[in-house]
Image (spheres, grey):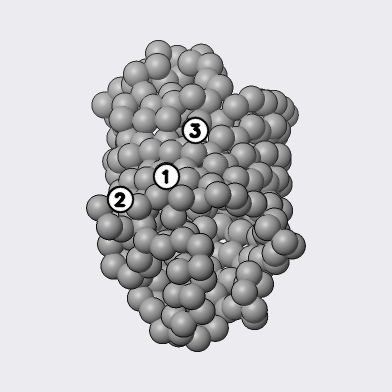
């Protein structure tokens, strides 16, 4: 769920799906976090409680004899930040739309473009399989943003996230590994009229998935990110990110509706950043 404050530990993003199929769904996430800010901001003991609602749509299709998909996700958030600002108890509330995410992915190896009975037959016989995919995700500056406020739901800048992933399935088990880099445009309307620049943030995450029966899945995940140091008006903030995240999820189908429950935890390995715990529940369905 990319529009929440949790690290993006999403499994099965390269999985084989039938072409010419529509997928839609929604979800809710609740996040609690301890936030560690630059000492120059003079804010201490900052805590966050965030409610996130997300809607998502994906369309699969054949592209140059490969299985491809394009998707869009939009969220709405209500957040409450509490802490001490210059020693005074302070509360900040924000609610509104998040930035929009768009993702285009193509499976380069494995996962042939199939649908209907051909897809079912292939998946039934695919006991051992390797899939390799590439994708480009984009974060669009559509979220609520107030340029004279330090805390915002939107980022007021674009982010481009190229991704490379591989899945290896063997029987009821599969392992997935994804690498990603995030490149950011500048925010020329940052807090108090300043300009925010940010170095690329690198992220790698892996997942182990066990299939009990078709559609019933349990997943454990682990991820790390590094980089993303910020510069404000040419002054380096020395706030490089270094986080560890982990997750567990369970998926269960009812007819054409797929239900999913997830827990995600993150911990910063630097003096600035945030430690968070997120629980989420979602559903998705498909049609052709």
Q: Which label's residue is closer to the chain start, 1 or 2? A: 2
Q: CB of mark 2 within 8 Å of CB of mark 3?
A: no
Q: Quadrant of residue 80?
A: top right
Residue under the image location 52 percent in, 20 percent down: 145
Label of residue 44 in the image: none
Residue 108 located left or right of residue 118: left
Q: Which label's residue is closer to the chain start, 2 or 3? A: 2
Mark 2 sits on what residue? 63
Q: Nearer the viewer, mark 3 or mark 1?
A: 1
Q: Which label's residue is closer to the chain start, 3 or 1? A: 1
Residue 241 pos. (x, y %):
40, 50
Alpha carbon of mark 3 to alpha carbon of mark 1: how far? Answer: 14 Å
Residue under the image location 40 percent in, 16 percent down: 189
Return the residue nearer the eye: 95 or 10: 10
Q: Using a 10 Å C-alpha cutoff, classify the residue at mark 1 as few (fewer than 14 neighbours), some (14 to 19) or many (20 or more).
A: some
Residue at the far front: name it. Answer: 117
Q: How many marks?
A: 3
Q: Under tag 3, what secondary structure? A: strand
Mark 1 sits on what residue? 70
Residue 35 located left or right of residue 258: left
Residue 12 pos. (x, y %):
49, 63
Label of residue 100 in the image: 3
Q: Quadrant of residue 35?
A: top right
Residue 104 pos. (x, y %):
37, 45
Q: Nearer the viewer, mark 1 or mark 2?
A: 2
Residue 238 located left or right of residue 48: left
Residue 196 pos. (x, y %):
35, 27
Alpha carbon of mark 1 to alpha carbon of mark 2: how far? Answer: 11 Å
Q: Is residue 261 visible?
A: no
């Amino acid at each position: 769920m990319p529009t929440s404050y949790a690290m993006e530990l999403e499994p099965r993003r390269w999985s084989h799906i039938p072409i010419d199929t529509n997928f839609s769904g929604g979800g809710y996430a609740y996040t609690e976090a301890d936030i560690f800010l630059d000492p120059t901001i003079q804010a201490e003991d900052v805590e966050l409680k965030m409610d996130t609602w997300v809607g998502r749509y994906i369309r699969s299709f054949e592209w140059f004899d490969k299985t491809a998909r394009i998707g869009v996700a939009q969220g709405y958030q209500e957040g409450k930040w509490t802490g001490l600002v210059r020693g005074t108890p302070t509360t900040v509330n924000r609610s509104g739309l998040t930035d929009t995410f768009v993702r285009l992915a193509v499976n380069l190896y494995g996962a042939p473009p199939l649908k209907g009975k051909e897809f079912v037959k292939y998946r039934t016989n695919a006991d051992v399989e390797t899939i390799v995919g590439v994708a480009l995700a984009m974060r669009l500056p559509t979220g609520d943003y107030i340029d004279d406020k330090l805390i915002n739901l939107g980022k007021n800048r674009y982010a481009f996230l190229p991704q490379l992933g591989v899945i290896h399935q063997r029987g009821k088990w599969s392992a997935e590994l994804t690498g990603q880099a995030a490149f950011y445009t500048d925010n020329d309307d940052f807090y108090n009229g300043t300009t925010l620049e940010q170095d690329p943030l690198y992220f790698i995450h892996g997942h182990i998935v066990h299939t009990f029966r078709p559609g019933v899945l349990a997943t454990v995940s682990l991820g790390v990110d590094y980089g993303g140091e910020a510069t404000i008006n040419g002054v380096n903030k020395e706030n490089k990110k270094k986080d560890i995240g982990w997750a567990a999820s369970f998926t269960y189908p009812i007819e054409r509706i797929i239900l999913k429950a997830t827990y995600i935890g993150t911990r910063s390995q630097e003096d600035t950043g945030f430690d968070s715990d997120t629980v989420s529940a979602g559903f998705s369905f498909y049609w052709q």
